[in-house]
Amino acid sequence: MSKIQPFHLAIPVHDLAACRKFYRDILGCEEGRSSDHWVDFNFFGHQLVIHYKESNNEPKTSNPVDGKDVPVPHFGVVLSMDDFNSLAEKLKTKSIEFIIEPYTRFKGLAGEQSTLFFKDPSGNALEFKSFKDINQLFAI
């Protein structure tokens, strides 16, 4: 397998200033290029761009996974277990309201992982996770 390359993801936000502060100050993402309508971030080694878009009232959906309502759509990063635990503690100290509190799903099964979900100030759902065995990332 070749070296994994960074992904690029652009997401809509209805409050550019609040989201800029959130990704920079809460998640600790380094800010890159920007304009009046968008901001680039180093999102754990990947390129995330927040783009201003007026708020809309599209209904939010979820799917059941391991007895929890997982928001759809969502995005995030797979971290090492140490980094996951550090981020979870950091988010708790910053009083982040979790959609799904940090926990371990699929215990004892293929793909056992720790996960957590929360939203940015514009309602974009994020998931961070860590696998007990990273080699089971795509396990069936």
Image: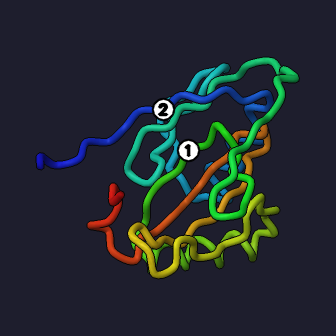
Precedes in sequence: disc 1 or disc 2: 2
Residue 22 lies, with reference to residue 137, above or below; the image says above
Describe residue 74's horizontal placement relative to residue 93 as left or right: left
Q: Residue under circle 2?
A: 9
Where does residue 17 sit, x and y in percent of width and height?
Answer: 76, 36
Coloring scheme used: rainbow
Name the outermost residue toward the right.
57
Where does residue 47 sit, x and y in percent of width and height?
Answer: 43, 38
Closer-to-camera residue (128/68): 68
Query: What secondary structure is marked by label 2?
Result: strand
Query: What secondary structure is marked by label 1?
Result: strand
Where does residue 64 sit, x and y in percent of width and height?
Answer: 69, 52
Q: Which is in the foreground here, disc 1 or disc 2?
A: 1
Q: Residue under circle 1?
A: 75
State if disc 2 and disc 1 touch (CB < 8 Å).
Answer: yes
- The residue carrying pointer 2 sits among few (fewer than 14), some (14 to 19) or many (20 or more) residues within 10 Å by Cα, namely few
Q: In which quadrant will I find the C terminus?
A: bottom left
Closer-to-camera residue (82/127): 127
Q: Amino acid at mark 1?
A: Phe
Describe residue 42's horizontal placement relative to residue 71 as left or right: left
Rendering quarter of residue 53: top right
Residue in view at x 77 percent, y 58 percent: 99
- The residue carrying pointer 1 sits among few (fewer than 14), some (14 to 19) or many (20 or more) residues within 10 Å by Cα, namely some
Residue in view at x 33 percent, y 60 percent: 139
Q: Amino acid at mark 2?
A: Leu
Residue 33 lies, with reference to residue 129, above or below; the image says above
Closer-to-camera residue (28/6): 6
Name the outermost residue toward the left.
1
